[in-house]
Image (cartoon, rainbow, N blue to C red):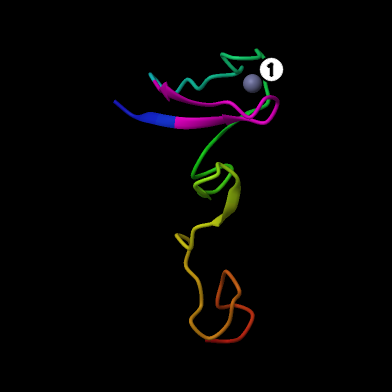
Amino acid sequence: MPIYEYHCKGCGHDFEYLVLGGSEPDHCPSCNTSKVCRLMSTCGFVTKGSGGQTVGKSASSSSCTGCSASSCAGCGH
Ligand SMILES: [Zn+2]
């Protein structure tokens, strides 16, 4: 069973949701807004520091070793 982690842009609440039959949550269980997005795909994987603040995104996406761009299209590597 695929369990995805979602993030609410309305109140900042993170929650896990068991996706059954491809149905996804359309509202936040905390504040009931529809401003939810799936982490790791829609929002990108965000690493949180010890203080809970966002410190940056992981380099899970392919990054070029020759430049700091997220793809190799920029520098020709
Ligand atoms: Zn919320």
Q: Is residue 11 magenta?
A: yes
Percent across and percent down for residue 26 are 59, 18
| In this picture, residue 60 sits left or right of residue 13 | left
Quadrant into which the N terminus falls = top left
Identify the magenta region: 5-19
Percent across and percent down for residue 41 are 51, 44
Q: Is residue 45 magenta?
A: no
The residue carrying mark 1 is 33
Percent across and percent down for residue 61 are 48, 61
Pick the residue in front: 50 or 64.
Answer: 50
Asked if ligand 1 lies within 8 A of label 1, the reply is: yes
Residue 9 lies, with reference to residue 72, above or below; the image says above
Percent across and percent down for residue 59 are 48, 63
Q: How many marks?
A: 1
Residue 10 lies, with reference to residue 59, above or below; the image says above
> Which secondary structure class fits the magenta region best?
strand
| Quadrant in which residue 9 is drawn | top right
Residue at the extreme left: 1
Disc 1 marks a residue whose amino acid type is Thr
Number of other residues with Cα within 10 Å of mark 1, as a class: few under 14, some 14 to 19, many 20 or more: some
Pick the residue in front: 23 or 26.
Answer: 26
Residue 30 lies, with reference to residue 11, above or below; the image says above
Q: Secondary structure at mark 1?
A: loop
Give the image quadrant in which the ligand numbered 1 is located: top right
Q: Residue at x 39, y 20 (%)?
A: 21
Q: Residue at x 69, y 17 (%)?
A: 33
Q: Residue at x 58, y 87 (%)?
A: 76
